[in-house]
Amino acid sequence: MHRRHCAHRVSRAFSARAVGVALAFVLAPLALHAQGRAFTPADWYRVTTVSQPAMSPDGKQVAFTVTTVVERENRRHSEVWLAPTAGGASRRLTAPGYESSGPRWSHDGTVLFFTSARPGGTGGTWALRMNVPGEAVQLENWPVGSVPKDGRFAVFAAAPGDTGAAAGGGRGGAAGSGGRGSALSRPPYDAITSALDPARFDGMHITAQRYKANGAGFLPSPASAPVRPRPQQIFTQAFDSTARRQLTSTDYSHRLVTVSPDGRWIAFIADARLRPDSVVRAEADSLAMLPFDPVRDQAPRNDADIFIIPIEGGTPRRVAEMLGTETAVKWSPDNKRLAFLGTPSRTSSVRLWVIDVAGGAPRNLVGTWRYEPADFEWITNDELVLGAEIGGRTALHSVSLKNGQMKEVVGGRRRLSGFSWDEGRRTVAYVSTSLESPTELYMADRDGRNERRITTFNEALSREIAFSSGERFTFQSVGGLEVEGWVMHPYGYDASKKYPLVLYIHGGPHAAYGENWFDEFQNLAGAGFLVLFTNPRGSSGYGADFTFATRGRWFAEDYEDLMKAVDIAAQRPDVDSTRMGVTGGSYGGVMTAWVTVKTDRFKAAQADRMISNWWSWYGTSDAQGLTEFEFFGRPWDNPVMYDTLSPIRYAPRVKTPTFILQSEEDHRTPMTDAEQWFVALRKHGVPAEFVRYPRSTHDLSRTGEPWLLVDRLHRLRVWFTHWLKPDPIPNARAKSITGH
């Protein structure tokens, strides 16, 4: 579920204006389908994912991660590659026998660091010397941190005695499923009981409240009294292998330290009152034990501020005092200003601010702009660039400090990620993807000109397969709110024909669909379905007011947004409104269940990573904070909301055949809710099927075992083909539609 995570009945009557929007959408010109064959689940194995670009300081090369699938071994494989920016073939940098990812350059471009799990080293950080051919090594005394323009030293934060910050850190602790002699089976330090015979006990012994996590599995309770982490102090270290020097010694931590380009000042973020870390933790722990209080819990807070100190150390000076939290502090090239991201509260939009280091009030560079900056860079002393989600797409904007003007420099109907600049901020590299195009590496000049594609990993596959594109539309929903949506065409689309349609509902709820290639949409489009997907209120990418409009109102207006999109799509001449399905995962899974509680207009449903009972979910999930925030407290604080928003309470209303997919090791939306929903449907005579995937977490559809992930894609199209195509397919014919 996304970090920005009483049902109400709302009328769904269409206004004349809404119908006009719908008809304009319906009658839009439709493009013929490109040449090529249909996508099948088996094609998923052949898609290459490009990610994590890192531009060299001189702008001549881009390192990046390439992830492929080794089908016969049921695994993914990641390598670091290098591409020349002037043109030419990309080449692999890391040994193919190891997993490698996350490239990042040293300040002078002579060393390329990357993350890899390989024998013979300590931790996961390795390095290639780019000016001397040779094997990857570990540079134990190479400082990693913020570097001034002359490159003499690095500044970083670390706990005294902790060498991990300078050396690159380690891989973290272990977790698992217990067993004789394991950390999970041994008695915790604060336990009252212990095993009669430890050699015969292979269970788990738990005293810690947080004892499991999605992905990590079950977590051992502490075997000894926890030692509180020491406050993070500021260190400097030269690049000549000399020892690091500690600049501060305080009871509070210094975070996000960054040195000025001239090397004279260090900016950092710390508790607004410079309270000791122990006091801040104690306050947070105490508040966490209290029931929700809207006056206390929603009151404006000043959690952190920006401070600076001289490079020699000394008393910190507060630069900006603002409500909320600041992050991503960056110096201007002339050392006179700091830019940073900040938000006054959890439910407020992130803004980009600039402040004079000498003093003065912070200046909001984006004003009341609807969208939220995600990252930014200084270009000159008077210009910055920022990346932001613009609804379902991504764009790079320039912002002038002289006149406040914003201009989109790189955008279009696509999603961009991983913006990485050369040292002179002349060119930028990024990953681009669109509805019909998997990821590739691109670069452009800082004004957006001279854009070019650097890699072609998916070019041959895109020529062979006719990946489906889609029509974008917007509509006025409840309360006059504009909502964005898309309809993806099926393979071999003919505007004169009618097709079955499947509504997809995203997770979160504070996530979003958009203008990127997505295997699940291509999967159903390749099987002959129109795919409807939309971003109802609660989605990210449209500003905080839109994102948090569903807080305390789940399944109210967000449900109406979805149904209005379906109403509009159902009017299209190419949609067979008697053959529609609905599917979704996580929030989309529980919303799918809710949809089948509220209406029987859909002839088939598929619920993935679902929730049916908020009470049982709260007691078994690793993400209780979601509903503590969204539902204004814990179940016993707000029992009516937890109860009335649980689909299980209304199971007798469901008539829609439902297919349930759940992962055995999903600790985000645990198995118990899927079990309850399956039993409830079966007890009421509703056709229901239930598949449980082993060795899988909440992220099966994204990062799960390849064989299981592809099996899931196969089952989705078989389920909807059975219920939504004119002639239900027998099991014997199922394989013929999935590429096997």
Image: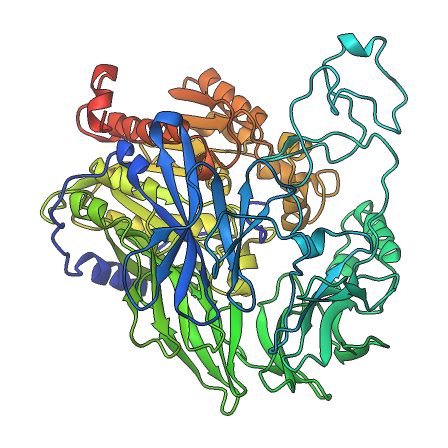
Quarter of the rendering containing residue 276:
bottom right
Quarter of the rendering containing residue 381:
bottom right
Image: 640 above or below 375: above
Give the quadrant of the C terminus.
Answer: top left
- Residue sitting at 37 percent across and 43 percent down? 504
Residue 302 visible here: no
Q: Which scheme is used to colour this image of the protein?
A: rainbow
Q: Is residue 728 left or right of residue 328?
A: left
Percent coordinates x, y for residue 3 in the rendering = 59, 51
Q: Is residue 44 left or right of residue 38?
A: right
Percent coordinates x, y for residue 102 in the rendering = 51, 52
Work out whether residue 578 or residue 59 is closer to the camera in this orientation and state it: 59
Work out whether residue 382 or residue 301 is closer to the camera in this orientation and state it: 382
- Residue sitting at 77 percent across and 61 percent down? 243
Image: 563 above or below 179: below
Image: 373 above or below 634: below
Q: Point out the residue furthest to the left here.
A: 496
- Residue sitting at 54 percent across and 80 percent down? 367
Percent coordinates x, y for residue 608 in the rendering = 45, 33
Work out whether residue 511 or residue 247 is closer to the camera in this orientation and state it: 247
Residue 127 visible here: yes
Image: 668 above or below 125: above
Quarter of the rendering containing residue 311:
bottom right
- Residue sitting at 54 percent across and 64 percent down? 545
Percent coordinates x, y for residue 254 in the rendering = 77, 64
